[in-house]
Image (cartoon, rainbow, N blue to C red):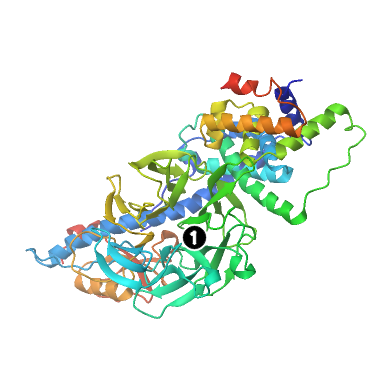
Amino acid sequence: MMTTVGGTPDSDGSTAGLADVYATHYAVLVGLARLLLDERGLAEEVVQEAFARTYAAWPRLRTPDDPLPYVRRAVVNLARGGLRRRMVARRAVGPRAAAAPSAESGALAGERRREVAAAVRALPRRQRECVVLRYFLDCSTAETADALGVSEGTVKQHLHRALGTLAVALGEDADEDAGRDVEEKA
Amino acid sequence: MTTDELLRDALRTDAERDPAPAPAAAGWDGVRTRGAQIRRRRRGAQGAVALVSILAVAAGVLALAGTFAGGGGGTRRGVVATPPGGVSDQIVVDRGDRIEVISATDGHVLRTLVSGIDSNPGGVSVTPDGTAVVYTRKSPAPRCGTELVEQPLDGGAERVIVGHSWNPLVSPDGQWVAYVTDDSCESGRPSAGAFLGLTGLRTGLNYRPYEQELGDHPAKLDLLAWSPDSTRLVYDEQRSFPDGSDQKTFEFSEPPLAKGAAQQEITVAGPVGGAAFLSDDRLVVSRGNGRRYEVLVTDFVSGRALRSRYAADGPTPSALALDPSGRRLLVTEPDGTLLVQEGVSDPRPIAHGAHGAAWLPAAKSTASSLTTPAVVGLSQADATQILTQLGFSVTILYTPGPTSVDANRVVSQQSIAPGSSVPPGTVVAITVGPIAVNASP
């Protein structure tokens, strides 16, 4: 006697909403994964897998009308695994040499952006996640906490530490404006 | 430009170095295909549980049939057997200096398997067929900590599986034992971290799926649970970050048996202690703040809490174990109290002084007089006996060799006439259709 358990997501409920999210948020989620992983190919794999897992989990999704937070959280969780592998690979090959700046990218603004991006990449993982979710995705404190599975207080704490670390790394005194959004968007 | 603005600008520029293409239709098709594949895998695990449920119903029917066959009165006849790897009412407990089998009902000691050992840091696991226990004991070589030993439950000779290891966890398919180890034995120096190790229980093949230290300190790595299909392993790692914070996270590998395979990390909010897999990618986890803890069911994909099983005062338990039905939960609290929770009932303490514990699956099918409906899973001999005793047709599912109750592995499904013998092989399930309920012997 064989028993069939469950069915395809489409038989349990339309996944059109997820397809819409895929169409509209794919690129920005790849951007999120890339900032967490610093590798484009892996970022795309992570986002694709996150959508696949959300699709598989569709019948038991508590908020099928708004799957984006679930997908976002899956991306963050999957990116952590990818990050671990990359860290191991980096440990094996040593730190990468900085790419020589091109004439165009030698512009001061571009240089400054690169410094900031590099400083963010050097942050501890959790702080980096908070910064990327907040400043790249413009997530609120609550959304960031939901994506990371931590409390809002923890998010604020990590952001505060991250901004302090960034200020030191960038050779600045802590900017009075830095973190203003932390309060404003909370 | 403020730092906030600079951060936004820098991150967006960095993310758009080579912009991600708009997703193609084929990409969504890929999502659907992969998603369906994941669901099929989950369905396989759920199917096993569903089959167990069916078998429980079948056992009840057999009980009824047994009563019929006995002609009523106070004596119930019939044959009920617990399947190899199925539910039993016994628990194996690591007491620190001995390994005991106790009753899951009231905790009384049924027998002592091993005594006179030092199991610290400990850990005990049972093979899925219930024939042997794998435990930790102090190694003869002082520097090399503990070793893993396999002790057959029938009193056979022990054997050392692997040296300098602890926290054993036998995979549900019985092929592997996973454990924690480090380099201090080989190098003679304290190790900076810990490694996840795997040894084939039958092949003796040793390897580390990840050539990396997982914990930031020795022994800061705990193996928590295998997935029911033996392809994933959840472990708990404590990592120290440059900012001084410590974080404990769950990670799992998929599959852990392939070097370099995808490894993913799932974080469950809060200080998490133990975990146990349900059949459908949900995890039962314990988490707390040192003074009070909660046992929760969580979604494994997102790490999101779904519902609470119970909450209690005290430090967070680091060891949880579910019985094969997924209904009974075994909790080892840090003070050594052993709790059993059935369904959503309040957990009840059954023993103290436990360093670790595991459910003991039934080692073999044993015919006995029927007292309560039970899951049925039968050996060839038992099935033949049923067919001889009962005067009606039954459906038998069987496999060509020893296996677990797993709907995906049933290779044949047949109705077999009364009195006939069962084909060679281990029968894993016997079901009785509606006709049996009304059948007269």
Q: Position of residue A102 (x, y in %)?
A: 90, 36
| B384 relative position to B74: left or right | right
Rendered image quadrant of residue B190: bottom right
The residue at 19%/61% (across/down) is B63
Q: Residue furthest bottom?
A: B157
For the C terminus of chain B, the image quarter is bottom left
Rendered image quadrant of residue B402: bottom left
Q: Residue furthest right?
A: A103
Q: Nearer the viewer, residue B22 or A139?
A: A139
Q: Position of residue A128 (x, y in %)?
A: 65, 37
| A44 relative position to A20: left or right | right
The residue at 54%/33% (across/down) is A154
User: Does residue A60 appear in the picture of this structure?
Assistant: yes
For the N terminus of chain B, the image quarter is top right
Which residue position is annotated with label 1?
B230
The residue at 62%/53% (across/down) is B262
- Figure check: B107 above or below B175: above
Q: Position of residue B315 (x, y in %)?
A: 39, 46
Q: Position of residue B110 (x, y in %)?
A: 26, 68
The residue at 53%/54% (across/down) is B220
Mark 1 Cα-neighbour bin, 10 Å: few <14, some 14–19, many ≥20? some
Task: Name the amino acid, label 1.
Answer: Ser
Q: Nearer the viewer, residue B195 or B428?
A: B195
| B1 relative position to B381: left or right | right
Q: Chain of mark 1?
A: B
